[in-house]
């Protein structure tokens, strides 16, 4: 995809030193900053933010980890250390609204930071995009994906953990593709297999890994595109397509990428 928008990412410290207070903090997350595949998602979403002229900034080198993984794997002390450090940084910059593409960070900031004194309006990027569509500020080009069939995989920490099923589907429907569902979807959707720290440990004994079964469900729909809204899901389903030798037949994209592509950004 040719870069039509020059990416210029504002840093919170620089903006504040200029006497400005950005409306949103965009939390990039570890995957969005370090994983080569998910860096593309960060770039796509930033292009959309710039297209919409959204007043935002990132923490840059001040961004650490949300603490989600260490809490899930049982290191409560490290979680609280990370969370309190983040809360101190957020409060220093008077952060009120946090945008993120990561449902795990979203869940942690929204549901767990308040217990430690961190109260913010936390918005997952699918809800943000849906709100912009409702306001008439985002209008996808239907011709870009003409004739394509799409299936959406529900991330656990966006769906079951936080009940967000409508926004991602509405955003995808705005693209003009035929959208189909897997047999297990919404509150019954099968996990990609990476949450709860499973991404970072060896597979346990069993007949089949979860990500392979979920990939098979997606392939069985006959979709041309799998839409994701989580960095972990992106990794697992990408690996699943490779395992099934289907990466040339089916493409996986984050919802932010699909929106950016439809706008030719």
Image (cartoon, grey):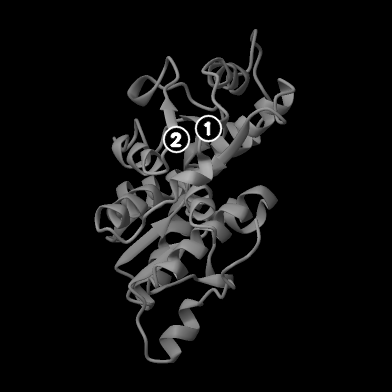
Where, quadrant-wise, is the C terminus in this rendering? bottom right
Q: Is mark 1 on a helix, strand or loop?
A: loop
Dot 1, crowdedness within 10 Å: few (<14), some or many (≥20)? few
The answer to which of marks 2 and 1 sits earlier in the sequence is 1
Q: Where is residue 163 in the image (x, y as percent from the top left)?
A: 29, 35
Q: Distance between the residues labelled 2 and 1?
A: 6 Å
Please name whichever residue, 19 or 78, is drawn nearer the observer in this view of the structure. 19
260 or 157: which is nearer to us?
A: 260
Can you give x and y, in whole percent of width and height, for residue 105 in the image? 44, 50
**Residue drawn at point x = 54 percent, y = 22 percent:** 218
- Residue 47 relative to residue 170: left or right: right
In the rendered image of this protein, does residue 90 appear above or below residue 208? below
Q: Residue at x 37, y 86 (%)?
A: 20
Q: Which quadrant holds the N terminus?
A: bottom right
* Proximity of marks 2 and 1: CB atoms separated by less than 8 Å: yes
Q: Report if residue 2 is visible in the image.
A: yes
Count of numbered circles in the view: 2
Nearest to the observer: residue 125 or residue 86: 125
Residue toward you, 144 or 137: 144
Residue located beneath label 2 in the image: 177
Q: In this view, does 258 lie to the left or right of 185?
A: right
Q: Seen in the image, is 265 located left or right of residue 156?
A: right
Q: Mark 1 points at which residue?
A: 148
The local secondary structure at tag 2 comes to loop
Q: From this view, report whether residue 8 is shown above or below residue 256.
A: below
Residue drawn at point x = 32 percent, y = 64 percent:
97
Name, please, the residue furthest toward the left: 135
Q: Position of residue 135 (x, y in %)?
A: 25, 58
User: To which quarter of the image does residue 123 belong?
Assistant: bottom left
Residue 236 locus on image (x, y percent): 62, 32
Q: Is residue 76 among what the camera can see?
A: no
Residue shown at 50% from the left, 71% from the top: 59
């Amino acid at each position: 995809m040719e870069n039509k928008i020059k990416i210029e990412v504002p840093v919170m410290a620089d903006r504040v030193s200029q006497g400005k207070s950005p409306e949103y903090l965009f939390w990039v997350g570890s995957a969005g900053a370090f994983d080569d595949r998910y860096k593309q998602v960060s770039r796509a979403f930033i292009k959309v933010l710039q297209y919409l002229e959204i007043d935002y900034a990132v923490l840059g080198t001040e961004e650490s980890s949300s603490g989600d993984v260490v809490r899930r794997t049982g290191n409560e002390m490290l979680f609280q250390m990370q969370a309190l450090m983040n809360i101190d940084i957020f409060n220093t910059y008077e952060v009120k609204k946090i945008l993120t593409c990561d449902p795990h960070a979203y869940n942690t900031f929204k549901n767990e930071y308040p217990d430690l004194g961190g109260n913010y309006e936390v918005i997952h990027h699918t809800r943000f995009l849906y709100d912009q569509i409702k306001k008439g500020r985002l209008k996808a080009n239907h011709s870009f994906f003409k004739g394509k069939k799409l299936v959406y995989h529900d991330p656990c920490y966006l769906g079951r953990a936080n009940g967000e099923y409508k926004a991602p589907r509405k955003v995808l429907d705005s693209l003009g593709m035929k959208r189909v569902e897997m047999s297990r979807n919404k509150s019954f959707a099968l996990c990609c297999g990476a949450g709860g720290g499973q991404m970072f440990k060896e597979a346990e004994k069993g007949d089949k890994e979860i990500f392979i079964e979920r990939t098979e469900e997606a392939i069985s729909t006959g979709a041309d595109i799998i839409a994701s809204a989580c960095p972990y899901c992106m990794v697992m389903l990408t690996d699943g397509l490779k395992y099934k030798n289907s990466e040339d037949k089916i493409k996986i994209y984050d919802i932010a990428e699909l929106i950016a592509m439809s706008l030719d950004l």
